[in-house]
Amino acid sequence: MADKGKKGKKKHVNKPTSKKYKKYKISGDKFTRDKCCPRCGPGIFLMVTNDRLYCGKCHYAEFVTKAK
Ligand SMILES: [Zn+2]
């Protein structure tokens, strides 16, 4: 006998995203939070790449010098 019903039983995978994403953190203690763009002002945050900060709005770039 085959099972009745129960077809298409999909596992519901819900990833809890309750925790707020941790902002990028650069090793060292210079940048531990997001930084605003000096040109665009507060509200416009700089994107952090490996070793630099970048503003996607005005294309301002700033290199991060890791204190060592
Ligand atoms: Zn900017």
Image (cartoon, rainbow, N blue to C red):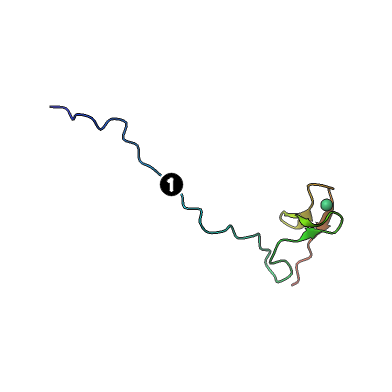
Q: In terms of image quadrants, where is residue 26?
A: bottom right
Q: Nearer the viewer, residue 51 or 61?
A: 61
Reply above or below: 53 against 3.
below
Residue 55 in the figure: left or right of residue 29: right
Q: Residue furthest front?
A: 43
Picture quarter with the N terminus: top left
Residue 45 seen in the figure: no
* Outermost residue to the right: 39
Q: Residue 63, percent across and down? A: 81, 59
Near mark 1 (Cα within 10 A), the count class, few <14, some 14-19 or many ≥20, is: few
Residue at the spot x=38%, y=42% of the render? 12
- Residue 5, given in percent of the width and then of the height, sits at 23, 30
- The type of residue carrying mark 1 is Asn
Residue beneath the point at 19% across and 29% down:
4
Q: Where 14 sits versus 37, above or below?
A: above
Depth order, front residue of 46/68 = 46
**What residue is shown at x 71% (from left), y 61% (from top)?**
34
- Quarter of the picture holding the C terminus: bottom right
Q: Position of residue 17 (x, y in %)?
A: 51, 53
Residue 54: percent from left, percent from top: 78, 52
Q: Is mark 1 within 8 Å of ligand 1?
A: no
Q: Which residue: 46% across, 49% down?
A: 15
Q: Is residue 31 visible?
A: yes
Instruction: Label 1: state its secondary structure.
Output: loop
Mark 1 sits on what residue?
Answer: 14
Q: In the rendered picture of this protein, how many numbered marks are placed on residues?
A: 1
- Which residue is more in the foreground, 25 or 38? 38
Instruction: Determine the residue located farthest toward the top in the rendered image.
Output: 1
